Every structure is written in C-alpha cells, then in structure tokens.
Amino acid sequence: MRPWLKQAPVRWALLLSLIFGLAFAFFMTLFMVPGMYLIAERLRRPMRKMWGGKWISFLGIPPFTPIFLYLIMVTLQLKPVQKFYRLPRNLLFGIALIPIFLILLWLLGAPSSLLGLLGLLSPIFPVMVVIRQLARPFMRRSDPAAHKV
C-alpha cells in the first residue's frame, strides 16, 4: 500500500475546511460587512440629528460601544416616552442621561454616596420604557380608522 493513501482522510478534511472557509469568507465579505456598515450608518443619522456634530461617530469605537448603544435607545425612545408620560422633554432627557453622569463621576473619583444615589436613579428611564411597552396593548386608541393598515 502506498503512504499517500493513508493520509487521504486528513487531506479530505483539510480540503473541506478550505472550501467551506473560503465560502464563509466570501459571504461575510460580500453581504455581512456592507450590511453592518449600512446598519451603522442608519443608526448614526438620527443620532447626529438629535445630538449634533460628528463626535457621536466616535462612540462606535469598541470601548465606548455600550454608551453608543444606550444613546441610540434614548434617541429612539425619547419621543414615545414623552408622549406616554406627558413630561417635558428636557426632564426626560436629564433622567435618561443619569447613567452617563454616573460613569463620568465614577471616572473622576466622586464620593461613593453620590455614586450610590445615581446608581439607584440610573434605571429610571429604562424602566419607564419597559412600562410604556407593557402598557401599549392596554391603551385605548382614540381613532381606530387612523391605525388601519
């Protein structure tokens, strides 16, 4: 028996992994990467519109990504929450930014009592969003004709 026949299963496994690896890389390069850029650009537009300037784009860099995602949630939920609770926009905006202030004060070395207070107040806006989402099915619609598809 020839020695290259004994190595055939290993070569077959290498060949399959090479073929499927190239196919996966092909689809990732042609579909996933442009799709992710498109999603990122569509999320940046409302952020720039609300927050102004190009500095918001820097928050997409990995160490700042959680802050960026939180600000996206605030941007998308501020107006619906404002309509639901009938509160001034500036008040809701201040409530929504409490977690960002908490992080900044923690980085600056603020006293722990202030950090504890802000830590207790920080989930207010996300809880308001969740309550609004849970209450939506039970809300009465004023004009049923306006909501037809």
Image: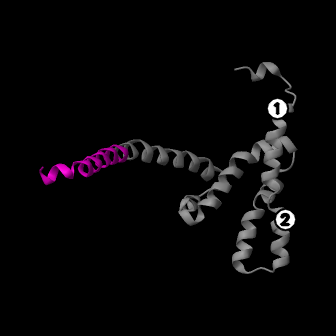
Q: Which mark is residue 137?
A: 1
Using a 10 Å C-alpha cutoff, classify the residue at mark 2 as few (fewer than 14 neighbours), some (14 to 19) or many (20 or more): few
The image shows residue 35, relative to residue 110, as above or below, that is: above
Residue 16 is one of the magenta-drawn residues: yes
Direction front: furthest residue: 1
Q: Secondary structure at mark 2?
A: helix
Sequence-wise first label, 2 or 1: 2
**Which segment did they paint magenta?**
1-25
Q: Secondary structure at mark 1?
A: helix
Cβ atoms at labels 2 and 1 below 8 Å apart: no
| Left or right of 135 in this view: 24 | left
Image coords of residue 75 (percent x, y): 69, 50
Of residues 81 and 36, the one drawn nearer to the viewer in this rendering: 36
Residue 123 is drawn in which quadrant? bottom right
Image coords of residue 136 (percent x, y): 82, 35
Task: Report the Cα–Cα distance between label 2 and label 1.
Answer: 29 Å
Indicate the amino acid at tag 1: Pro
Q: Dominant secondary structure of the magenta stretch?
A: helix
- What residue is at 52 percent from the left and 48 percent from the top? 41
Indicate the amino acid at tag 2: Leu
Please state, as top left, top right, bottom left or bottom right, where the C terminus lies in the image: top right
Image coords of residue 56 (percent x, y): 59, 59
- What residue is at 37 percent from the left and 45 percent from the top? 24
Residue 80 is drawn in which quadrant? top right
Residue where numbered disc 2 is placed:
120
Image coords of residue 146 (percent x, y): 77, 22
Q: How many marks are shown on the rendered structure?
A: 2
| Left or right of 70 in this view: 83 | right
| Left or right of 75 in this view: 88 | right
Of residues 28 and 10, the one drawn nearer to the viewer in this rendering: 10
